[in-house]
Image (cartoon, rainbow, N blue to C red):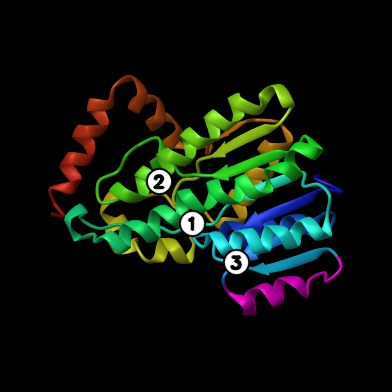
C-alpha cells in the first residue's frame, strides 16, 4: 500500500486520473489538477484536509506556473508526479488542421513536459518519482491515430531520457502504456476504434495496475495482455503489424 506520500495528479477529474485519486486519497496527500471545477470540488469533498484541487489546463503555461506555485506554498516536496492529462483523437491525417494539432500535442505532450519542469524542484528534493501515462500507441503507431501516436511516442522518449538523466540522483521515471481504456476521451473515437477490434479496460483496473507496478519499481508498465506480445512483434517484425493493420484500414478509408 502507498502511504504518506505527497502526490500530484494531472487530469484527475475523470478516467484513469480520477481512479488514481480514489485509490490514493485515504492514505496520502493529493494535489489534483483538472479543468472541470465542479468535478474538482466533488473530489475535494472526499477529504478536504488531504485533497487539494487546482483548476488547471496543462496547455496553458500561465496556468501551469500559477498552480505549481500554489502547490509549492503548500508543500516543500512532492514524492510522486503522475502526468495523466491527455486527450484521444482519431481521424484521417488530411482531416486535421493546425488548431487540432496544437490541441492534441499541447495536451498530451507539451503539457506533461511543462508540468514536470515546474514540479521537478520538489521531486528532486524528495528523490521522488515521475509516472508518465502514455499508451500502447506509443509503441505501435496506429493508422488514423497519427498525431495521437506521435504524442505518445514523444512521452515514451521523454520518459526514457529523463530517467537516464536523473537516475544518478535517485529519481525514478516510470512509463505507463495502457491499452484502450473506457474513458470519456475514448468515447470520441469509438466509432473508428471498433474497426480494429480493440480490447478495452476499465479505468479502475488500469489505475490499480499502475500503482501495483509502481510499488514493484517496474519502470516500464505495460498491460498483462495480448497487446504486450504485439509490442515485441513490432520491434522484431514490424512488417507483420503493417500488413495486419493494412488489411483493416482498407475497409475504412
Q: Is residue 27 left or right of residue 67?
A: right
2 and 3 marks in contact (CB < 8 Å): no
Front of the two marks 1 and 3: 3
1 and 2 marks in contact (CB < 8 Å): yes
Which structural element holds mark 1? Answer: loop
Which residue lies at the image location 44% right of the left edge and 51% below the top edge? 180
Q: In the rendered image of this protein, does residue 192 appear above or below residue 54?
A: above
Q: Position of residue 160 (x, y in %)?
A: 53, 29
Give yes or no for residue 112 being in the magenta stretch: no
Which structural element holds mark 3? Answer: loop
Which residue lies at the image location 25% right of the left edge and 46% below the top edge? 143
Badge 1: residue crowd in 10 Å (few <14, some 14–19, many ≥20): many
One can see residue 60 in this view: yes
Report the magenta residues as a range.
36-49
Q: Tell which circle, 1 or 3, labels the residue nearer the N-terminal end.
A: 3
Give yes or no for residue 37 being in the magenta stretch: yes
Q: Which mark is residue 56?
A: 3
Q: Which mark is residue 151?
A: 2
Q: Position of residue 62 (x, y in %)?
A: 57, 63
Rounded to the nearest angstrom, the CA distance separating label 2 from label 3 is 20 Å
Q: Residue furthest bottom?
A: 38
In the picture, residue 57 is in which quadrant?
bottom right
Which structural element holds mark 2? Answer: helix
One can see residue 22 in this view: no
Rounded to the nearest angstrom, the CA distance separating label 1 from label 3 is 13 Å
Mark 1, residue position: 86
Front of the two marks 2 and 3: 3
Q: Tell which circle, 1 or 2, labels the residue nearer the N-terminal end.
A: 1
Amino acid at each position: 500500500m502507498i502511504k504518506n506520500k505527497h502526490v500530484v495528479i494531472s487530469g484527475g477529474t475523470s478516467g484513469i486520473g480520477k481512479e488514481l485519486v480514489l485509490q490514493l486519497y485515504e492514505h496520502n496527500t493529493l494535489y489534483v489538477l483538472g479543468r472541470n471545477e465542479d468535478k474538482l470540488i466533488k473530489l475535494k469533498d472526499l477529504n478536504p484536509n488531504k485533497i487539494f484541487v487546482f483548476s488547471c489546463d496543462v496547455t496553458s503555461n500561465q496556468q501551469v506556473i500559477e498552480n505549481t506555485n500554489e502547490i509549492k506554498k503548500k508543500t516543500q516536496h512532492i514524492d510522486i508526479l503522475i502526468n495523466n492529462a491527455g486527450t484521444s483523437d482519431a481521424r484521417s491525417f488530411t482531416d486535421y488542421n493546425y488548431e487540432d494539432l496544437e490541441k492534441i500535442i499541447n495536451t498530451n505532450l507539451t503539457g506533461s513536459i511543462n508540468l514536470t519542469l515546474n514540479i521537478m524542484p520538489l521531486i528532486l528534493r524528495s528523490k521522488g518519482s515521475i509516472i508518465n501515462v502514455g499508451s500502447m500507441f506509443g509503441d505501435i503507431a496506429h493508422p488514423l491515430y497519427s498525431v495521437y501516436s506521435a504524442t505518445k511516442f514523444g512521452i515514451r522518449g521523454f520518459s526514457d531520457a529523463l530517467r537516464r538523466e536523473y537516475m544518478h540522483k535517485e529519481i525514478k521515471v516510470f512509463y505507463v502504456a495502457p491499452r484502450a481504456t473506457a474513458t470519456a476521451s475514448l468515447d470520441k473515437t469509438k466509432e473508428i476504434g471498433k474497426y480494429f477490434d480493440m480490447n478495452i479496460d476499465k479505468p479502475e483496473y488500469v489505475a490499480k495496475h499502475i500503482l501495483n507496478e509502481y510499488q514493484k519499481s517496474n519502470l516500464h508498465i505495460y498491460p498483462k495482455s495480448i497487446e504486450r506480445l504485439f509490442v515485441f512483434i513490432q520491434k522484431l517484425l514490424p512488417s507483420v503489424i503493417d500488413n495486419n493493420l493494412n488489411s483493416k484500414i482498407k475497409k475504412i478509408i
